[in-house]
Amino acid sequence: MTVRVGVIGAGMIGQDHIRRISRVLTGGAVVAVNDVDAARAGQVAAGLPGAVVHATAQDLIGDGDVDAVLVASWGPAHEEQVLAAIGAGKPVFCEKPLAPSSGACLRIVDAEVAHGRRCVQVGFMRRYDAGYQAMKAALEDGSIGAPLLMHCAHRNPSVPPYGFTTEMIISDSAVHEIDLVRWLFGEEVVAARIFKPRRSGKAGLPEEPLRRAALAARRARIALTARAPGPACGPASPPACW
């Protein structure tokens, strides 16, 4: 059986998903594409045998030839698109962030619960990485003792030249580390602190490209505190639960 996938968002990440589905994995085929840039959607679809271009995300989700939906669009569009996929009864993979706010994420969780079965997955791929799985196994079997501290470093050498905000360094980047803390330790995050550096007067000098990139992203440092999971949400809960 081949799962027919419709992809919403044909930018860098969307195209990478398309490449994997088409050239790396078996059992899947990209049959429909949508992007706010219709020309780009057409270019991407031209390289996929039989793929069609839809003018809107809603049209793609409603296409009877689409079995599952992959959302790789701009973050603020995720809620509407994921909810539409749930409403259509189609499995949906959503790139992080699931949505830009906790309220939007909880609306998605509520819709999935009302639907009666799990059909949403968020793009937290590190849980499936062999190195991280080996680390989790070592933590769980106690071979290195009890974990006391987790230190993560997430470096973005560059950011998109359009629309990148301070908040996105959390919701689009550091969210991976937040997910890993919960998954590796089997505990909930109960507190977070963000330290934002002051803007440097040396910003913009040609000899400091990395400094410019860091300042453009307004890189933040996050300290997280975890505790044992409560009754409502736990490490096995949907990522939107927290």
Image (cartoon, rainbow, N blue to C red):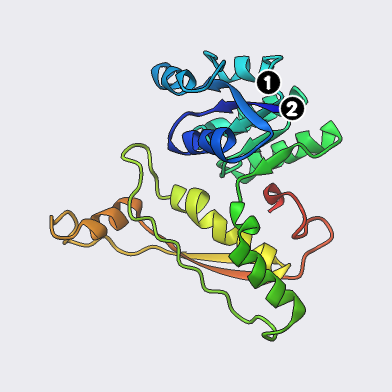
CB atoms of marks 1 and 2 within 8 Å: yes
In the picture, the disc for residue 173 is: none
Between disc 1 and disc 2, the foreground one is: 1
Between residues 79 and 33, which one lies in front from this camera angle? 33
Label 2 CA crowd tier, 10 Å (few <14, some 14–19, many 20+): some
Residue 164 at what x, y percent from top left? 38, 43
In the rendered structure, which disc, 1 or 2, sits on the residue that comes first in sequence? 1
In the picture, the disc for residue 90 is: 2
Residue at image mark 1:
66
Residue type, mark 2 in image:
Lys
Number of numbered markers: 2
Q: In this view, does 111 lie to the left or right of 165?
A: right
Quarter-of-image position of residue 177:
bottom right
Residue 157 at what x, y percent from top left? 33, 55
**Separation of disc 1 and disc 2 at Cα?**
8 Å
Above or below — where is 225 with respect to 201?
A: below
Residue type, mark 1 in image:
Val
Above or below — where is 160 with respect to 68?
A: below
Q: Which residue is drawn at 86% across and 35% down?
A: 116
Element marked by disc 1: loop
Q: Which residue is drawn at 55% across and 41% down?
A: 100
